[in-house]
Amino acid sequence: MKASGAELDANALLRADEIPNDWVMYHQSYKSWHYSALDQINAGNVKDLKVAWIHTPGANKRGVQSVPIVVDGILYYTTSNSQIWALDGATGAFLWKFEPKIDQERAEGTVYNPYNRGVAAAYGNLYVGTVDGRLIAVDMKTGKPVWETQILTVDKGNKGFTGAPLVVKDKVIIGADGGELSGCCGPITAVDARSGKIVWQFDTIGGDERSRASWKNDSWKTGGGGGWMTGGYDPKTDTVFWGTANPAPDYDWSFDKWQTEGPRPGDNLYTSGVVALDPNTGKLKSYFQENPHDNWDFDGAVGEFVMLDRDGKSYVVHPNKGGYVYVYNRDVSNDQLKIENVWHLGKTSNFVKDVDPKTGQLIGRRELHEGMNKMLCPAIDGAISWNSGSYSPDTGLYYKIGQEFCADQEVVKVDKPADFSGKLYLGATWTVVAPPGHDKAYGHVDARDPITGKVAWSVKYPEPPLASLLSTAGGLVFVPDARGWLHALDAKTGKDLWKANDGVLHNGGIISYEANGKQYIAVVTGFPSMVSEGYPAMFGPPYTMMEQNTGALIVYTLE
């Protein structure tokens, strides 16, 4: 099955996993497997993989972080300031570039400027969010703007968009960043895909009475929130699942009195968890707050919702920054999502003693007191980052990166900013340190049963890899590591079968597609990100010598 840009409608998107030649959405399909059914490149011949072509977009602050997409053999990817590039997937030939004019004063006023993580495609358009709060539709054939909608304004906080949108039916859905900013209301917004008209908005904080009651002293007005990465969609229940961001300030000095004292007393709904929304109306169907009153910046907005069916049950597997992977039942008929299991990916953790695998409740919270809190694990960047793992239906395994580092966290009282001001609101400074028993931080790629968490194999990396993973029907798992090496591992054993150096850290997406009868692997590079900008001080070479604020798209195929 193929789908041209014009034919890529709601029905075609439902069958995205039946279009292996292309990669038509951020997570490949609504299943969010990051898996390619192509097998021309396989464990037997991957040793013959060579560079087919390279595209260098020029200077890019914080590197290239997007997941490319491919529609009818044309590859599209984004770079800094929401620029979109269109290239011939077989040759790399330049087709067009779209470069929106960005409000740089507003954009530079946030910590999220100016990276962008991807586009959505449907109805002949590409859809991209901007750091200054707009959603723009661009004609896929010409690169000309079709419409733009200013969704977020500064009157409720200086929030914008860095994640890729998600098209569901006739709507484009996108979540705001700004969890660290003293604004409101962390919206997730749907617009009409053809006209750009706003259809609905769900506020992750302050949007209903239950939420406002969980932020005493009207602290929701400076509460951050949001949903900064791409969510998921389950056609079976007609439900959008979206991960929600941390509250502001990130760190709370009230210690164990956080229910009644401090800058944001209460549970702070609906931050640091998952909301299940009706895609037609934006109405809340169900939710689960994974970290009530999150005091560690371990939110659920990393954006991965792996849809699986097994033994008569429908699951959605969702990791969060704290390193715990929540396995939910996709039944949304109850007020709160049903927990089927919770398992721990990270090897280093002390922010809680555990999470109850039956209820999802935190056991033994580590509250932070004013002053120095030594060895908080994991560090603010999380045991899991926003990069996506991959599920292979061939092996039944879920491949996911774990990050092992801790932080010495100094919590400080800060003055409450004005309501809706959009000012940075942190409440702490920190120094990243190695986990107990280790000289340096490190990372690993695990192959696990996605429901039980049972480990099949694990490969250690000297520094945490920061890019997404790709599994294929060729029996491979591709791991773009932090040192610039792209690895092809045996999906069953984790054995390293092939590697090539792309010259700089990987910090974005990797996909596979077919053009003119050949299978390709496309990966982006770029350094530094908000996480990897600390790598030179933590690890030294090669990060002290890597070229900064640049990046490339590198495409491989068989000789």
Image: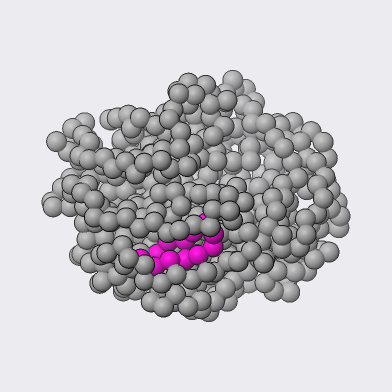
Asked if residue 132 lies in the magenta stretch, the reply is yes
**In-image side of 349 versus 462 (left or right):** right
Q: Residue at x 55, y 38 (%)?
A: 531
Depicted 491 relative to depicted 207: above or below = above
Q: Residue at x 55, y 41 (%)?
A: 530
Depicted 192 relative to depicted 516: above or below = below
Quadrant (top left, top right, bottom left, bottom right) of the C terminus: top left
**In-image side of 479 versus 464 (left or right):** left
**In-image side of 116 versus 523 (left or right):** right
**Where is residue 264 shown, x and y percent of the image?**
79, 57
Asked if residue 445 lies in the magenta stretch, the reply is no
Q: Quadrant of residue 379?
A: top right
Quick check: can you spot residue 405? Answer: yes
Residue nearer the viewer, 519 or 140: 140
**Where is residue 210 shown, x and y percent of the image?**
73, 71
Q: Write the start and end of the magenta stretch as one range.
A: 127-138
**Where is residue 354 shown, x and y percent of the image?**
66, 44
